[in-house]
Each structure stands twice: as C-alpha cells, then as structure tokens.
Image (cartoon, rainbow, N blue to C red):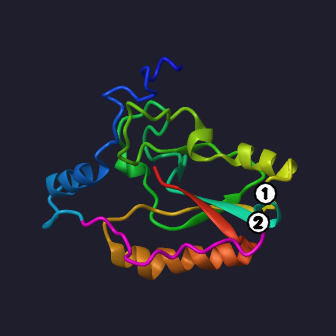
C-alpha cells in the first residue's frame, strides 16, 4: 500500500481534480473579457482508431509549452506568470534534440506541476526510447507547439489547419497532445 492511499486504496481527500474550467472562466472575466470563457469541446470527437499497430505507427508530440526566447522576461522553471513569453503562431522543431521549453506564459497548477522537469511536458526522450525498443514505430522528425487562445475561431481557422498541414508533411500518423 502506498503512502498516498488508505487501506481501501483510495487517494487522500485533498487529491482531487483541479477545477480548470471554473478557474479559466474566472481568469478571463478578471482580465476584462466581456463574457465568461466557453470551454471548447465537440459533440463528435475527431479521434479515430489507429490504422496499424502502435509499433508500426509514426507518433508526434504537440505541446502548448513555449521555446525560451531571449528578451521576453523570466521564463525559467520558477518564473512567475509571464504573458510576454507567450507565442502567437504554430511552431515546429526537430524531435531528435531535447529542447528547453518554458511554461511561464501559461496558467497552470503550480502546486502539482514541476516546471523544471521538461520531460513532464515534452517527453521526447521517453518517446525516443519507446521507438528504440519497438513500442512505437517512430517518432516523427519534428514536434509542434500550438498557442493557447481565448479565440476558438483563430484556433479552428488558423492554428488547426496549419498544425494539420505540418503533421501530414512529417508523415505523423498519431499525435500526443500535451496541453499545460
């Protein structure tokens, strides 16, 4: 039995889901947006089964983490919230290199997230090991970053199509979305 569970295997009472939806609504109202944030979700989900076994599938990673950019203020693991570090366009970078990314531009649960552990939000090393062990077919040549937006329209009309074009260009057959 783990120290994190009781005799029945239950998690401690304080171990509950973080109320992200309500926090997002409160944040955008506090920022002066005219209406509460409406969380985007589809009635019909665009997920499909893999066309071939995972060990023959090319996988890519999509993240909301940002490249560390000089001149945009503190962006390290212990940085305070820093909207200046946000990025506005989809980006791509080689999967073979382990990038140092930041999440200071995002609101996240700082009590339960280790911003110093790049592998927690960009698991390229784990995916490279999975490919080497034959658990996945391959890691695509690039990973991709997508900005977080208040505007669903920009996400659907600009970022989504741009991201899809890049995934197809790379031959990615499945994607792991790591949204901070």
Would residue 50 be found to the left or right of residue 18 on screen? right
Q: Residues within 10 Å of mark 1 (few under 14, many from 20)?
A: some
Would residue 85 be found to the left or right of residue 177 on screen? left
Question: Residue 143's spot in the image, x, y percent?
Answer: 66, 60
Task: Pick whichever of labels 2 and 1 is earlier in the sequence.
Answer: 2
Q: Hey, which quadrant is residue 52 in on the image?
A: bottom right
Mark on residue 65? none
- 170 or 134, nearer to the observer: 134
- Looking at the rendered image, the disc whose residue lies closer to the viewer, 2 or 1, is 1
Say whether residue 128 is magenta.
Answer: no
Say whether residue 48 is magenta.
Answer: yes
Specify start and end residues of the magenta stretch as a single range.
38-52
Name the outermost residue toward the front: 8
Q: Which residue is mark 1?
A: 136
Q: Is the residue 75 above or below the residue 7 in the image?
A: below
Disc 1, SS: loop
Disc 2, SS: strand
Is there CB contact under 8 Å for labels 2 and 1? yes
Mark on residue 58? 2
Residues under labels 2 and 1: Cα distance? Answer: 7 Å
Residue at image location 63% in from the left, 40% down from the top: 119
Residue at image location 34% in from the left, 37% down from the top: 16
Question: Residue 121's spot in the image, x, y percent?
Answer: 56, 45
- 113 or 2, nearer to the observer: 2
Residue at image location 28% in from the left, 46% down from the top: 19
């Amino acid at each position: 039995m783990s120290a994190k569970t009781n005799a029945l295997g239950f998690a401690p009472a304080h171990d509950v889901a973080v109320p992200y939806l309500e926090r997002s609504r409160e944040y955008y109202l506090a920022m002066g947006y005219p209406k509460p944030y409406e969380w985007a979700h589809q009635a019909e989900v665009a997920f499909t089964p893999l066309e071939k076994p995972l060990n023959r599938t090319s996988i890519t990673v999509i993240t909301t983490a940002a490249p560390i950019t000089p001149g945009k203020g503190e962006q390290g693991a212990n940085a305070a919230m820093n909207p200046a570090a946000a990025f506005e366009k989809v980006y791509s970078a080689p999967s073979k290199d382990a990038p140092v990314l930041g999440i200071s531009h995002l609101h996240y649960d700082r009590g339960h997230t280790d911003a110093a552990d790049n592998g927690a939000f960009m698991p390229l090393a784990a995916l490279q090991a999975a490919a080497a062990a034959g658990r996945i077919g391959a890691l695509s040549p690039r990973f991709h970053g997508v900005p977080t937006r208040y505007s669903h329209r920009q996400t659907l009309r600009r970022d989504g199509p741009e991201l899809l074009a890049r995934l197809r260009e790379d031959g990615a057959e499945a994607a792991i979305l790591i949204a901070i």
